[in-house]
Amino acid sequence: MQNMRKTKAQLVEELARLRESQTRAEALAGEHVRVLRALRERVKELDCLYGISRLSQNRELPMEHLLRQVAELVCQSWQYPEITCARIRLNEPEGGLDLSTRNYRPSAWGQTSPIEIQGERVGDMEVRYLEPRPLADEGPFLQEERNLLDAVADKLGRLVLAARTEAQMLVLSRELIRAQETERLRIATELHDHLAQDLATLKMDLGGLLDPPAPSPQELPRQLAALAERLSGAITATRDLAYDLLPPGLEDLGLVRTLSRYCADFAKRTGLGVEFYADGMEGLRLGFETQINIYRMTQEALTNVRKHAKATQATVRIILSHPSVIVRIEDNGQGVDLEKRQEEIREARRMGLWGMRERARLLGGTLTLRSKPGRGMLVHIEIPVENRDNGV
């Protein structure tokens, strides 16, 4: 009887162990299922991100087609791809895009992530289920799906920024080529129509002095003086042409003295009163790239004053205000309504103002305009000087 009781106790103990083992096995099986499910989700996420990276490497693929394929990839990466739809909206300056998968329609089960460029919201990406599904971390969606959606939206923001930058560089390249050809045409015209003809005429007139009958002793000095004056004009034209191509003395004299000389010469040539002031620039060493770009922006600003402002006076100030060099070109001309003409200025794509802004941007700086009708215009240029002390 005692042996039978021991046997029953052992059976109960063994049964308890079996139940415990079964419980552990069920827990392990459940954990195994969860791990496999998580791995499948991770693989889908990686496939999605890899697919987007591969699409972005195709430079020939239009943005519209790229976004449409991204939407399809996203749908395949969610838990229930058969009932998943997606939509991508972008607010572009040249016209927005609104793309969605073929099965898209509004529903009660959705999640959205903003598409941003440097903190500015330029659109959003939306994923929806077309039928109800069990609740998870965010409605029927997993936390991992929220993370993936945010990652895709961030990737799209970077792709849109890259596309915008590439488009801007393309426009800039075209404008630079156009400006280069225009400058070449101007130089060729100046050399051929003016300088070459002046020199040819001088040569003929000099030859005429040697042909009989020779000028009288009283006439010869007058003719030589006239030839010398015309030769002096040709030399001045040649110097002005070289001055426009590369300001002499920029590397030797420095930016301040070169700008001062340019303002004085500009006033003398055009009749526009130009005052120049510099403050705090003593001892500051700027690289040649910084100097030539500041010089060109000042040159372009004064040219615009002469052509468009109907001004009688302009003032150029260059000031060191740590950590920046500030250049201000101000005139007393007719001014403009910048709010009304902002779009026109942006759309013009001329190498004047737009080129000045690009020069400032390439130096890490900014260019802003302030103007009102009848009150002239102020061009404010601000260029950081940190890490720019390795030049002359």
Image (tube, helix red, strand yellow):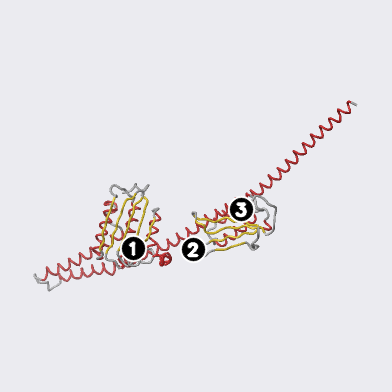
Q: Amino acid at mark 3?
A: Cys
Q: Amino acid at mark 1?
A: Met
Would residue 20 be found to the left or right of residue 330 on screen? right
Residue where numbered disc 2 is placed? 93
Q: Which of disc 1 and disc 2 is earlier in sequence?
A: 2
Residue 304: x %, y % from top left: 33, 64
Residue where numbered disc 1 is placed? 377
> Please, what secondary structure does the residue beneath circle 2 have?
loop
**Quadrant of residue 29 within the rendered picture:** top right
> Please, what secondary structure does the residue beneath circle 3 have?
helix
Viewer-side label of 1, 3: 1
Q: Nearer the viewer, residue 33 or 140?
A: 140
Q: Amino acid at mark 2?
A: Pro
Residue 256: x %, y % from top left: 28, 53
Q: Residue at x 61, y 51 (%)?
A: 146
Estimate the spatial distance between the alpha carbons at disc 3 and disc 2, rounded to whole Å: 28 Å
Residue farthest toward the left in the current orientation of the protein: 217
Estimate the spatial distance between the alpha carbons at disc 1 and disc 3, rounded to whole Å: 52 Å
Viewer-side label of 2, 1: 1
Q: Residues within 10 Å of mark 1 (few under 14, many from 20)?
A: many
Quarter of the figure that contains the N terminus = top right
Labels 2 & 1 near each other (Cβ < 8 A):
no
Q: Nearer the viewer, residue 175 or 264?
A: 264
Residue farthest toward the top in the current orientation of the protein: 2
* Disc marking residue 287: none
Residue farthest toward the right in the current orientation of the protein: 1
Estimate the spatial distance between the alpha carbons at disc 2 and disc 1, rounded to whole Å: 27 Å
Q: Nearer the viewer, residue 332 or 390?
A: 332
Residue where numbered disc 3 is placed? 48
Q: Which of disc 2 and disc 3 is earlier in sequence?
A: 3
